[in-house]
Image (tube, rainbow, N blue to C red):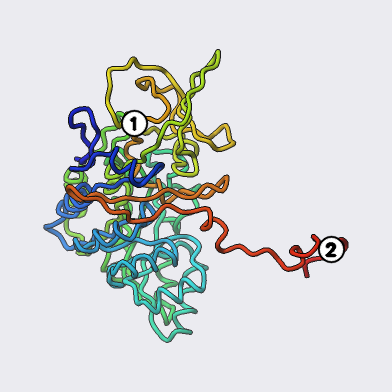
Amino acid sequence: MHHFQYKDDELYCEDVPIRAIAEEVGTPCYIYSCATLGHHFTVFDSAFKDVSHLTCYSVKANSNLAVLKLFGSLGGGMDIVSGGELYRARTAGIPAERIVYSGVGKTVQEIDYALRENILMFNIESLEELDAIDKRAGVNGVKARIALRINPDIDPNTHPYISTGMKKNKFGISIDNALSAYQKARRLKNIEIMGVDCHIGSQLTEVAPFIDALKRIRVLIERLGQAGIEICYLDLGGGLGIVYDHEAPPQPHEYAESILKELEGVPCTLIFEPGRVIVGNAGILVTKVLYTKRTPSKNFVIADAAMNDLVRPSLYGSYHFIQPVKRSEKATEIVDLVGPICESSDFLAKDRGLPQPAGGEYLAVMSAGAYGFSMSSNYNSRPRAAEVMVSGGRYFVVRKRESWDDLVRLENIPEFLSVGGPLHGQGCG
């Protein structure tokens, strides 16, 4: 369910016409529906209402403070993968006891910050990281609560770039080595074992890989219990897919039924880390057509949004449905929708049928709420887009558009370049 619908041939977000936002805020811009965000979170969370659980939204999917604040107000926690995401979560008012810290490359600075904030637990990705966190916990005079992220070697049947649970992936500790890793953790004096963590990938469109992984994790939990290692939390990660094109992913209640059936009798509090399934279809990217260009082999529509704004099509070959903000009866034309960036990979769609777009018209790139703005960049010195949240008949700019001044705000020209140019033959030391 989402709240982007046509009314009299004008595309609306909830009760606000998209055109009005685009003309006031400018393009490109991201627009999020507050009602859709809240609905999706509640549907997912309520699917597990009969068991002890915590829904920790995956901050990397969309880290805007307003989005985090909304989910926190609904009782959600956060799954973070960096110190910056922890800072965002705490700034948005998320209680530390609802935050879990994943990721393969936690630095000393980030570990210390998370220990000071007293987060719920770290999801440990390697034995060296386990030693590092034990050491930093000792330095800080605290115990670090941890789960080990277990790699169950399950093929999630998704794009290889977003597969995380196979032997060849960089994530987690092999399930074959899991028992010895937990035994090592038990011997460390500054570590408190809390749980088991498992995340196998993103944009999964069937339940079977989740269940295959869960079967292996359940056996591990039983073996840990036999070894005297009690597990309080089972973190099953995220990864549930959404509809971009013709996918048919399971609904949250179907996912929950399968998970809970497999987990019957396991006395753990469940943690989930949904991201895309909550925010993906709750946001769009709006772009203005700048020019059209026809060649003997291709027709191009050149828009003001580019791969720096939405990199998924260039990076993954991902599909996003695209529709005009103002619906018309114009004939459909097969075009490549491209941006202004000087790369042949700068496209939002290839060989796509669109109703003959013309300069000045607005297009909506749908299902862009996840891994859209959060993966954007300043490539080609392009300011990042504005972000807007709509609630009913009102809209709010929840992140201002960057300016050209913002692009150079943190940069400095060294003094030796300010007078007469560089001094030849002298280094920078």
Q: Quadrant of the C terminus?
A: bottom right
The kind of secondary structure element at disc 2 is loop
- Which residue occupies 44% across, 21% down? 335
Is residue 216 left or right of 176 when viewed as pictured?
Answer: left
- Which residue occupies 46% across, 31% down? 290
* Residue 31 on image: x %, y %: 31, 45
Label drawn at residue 321: 1
* Residue 263 on image: x %, y %: 21, 54
Q: Which amino acid does label 1 sit on?
A: Phe
Q: Nearer the viewer, residue 63 or 389?
A: 389
Q: Which of 256 and 409 is in front in this view?
A: 409
Residue at the extreme left: 50
Q: Which of 54 and 321 is in front in this view?
A: 321
- Which residue occupies 35% across, 42% down? 368
Q: Is residue 300 above or below residue 124?
A: above
- Which residue occupies 43% across, 38% down? 159
Q: In which quarter of the image is the N terminus?
A: top left
Q: Which of 68 and 222 is in front in this view?
A: 68
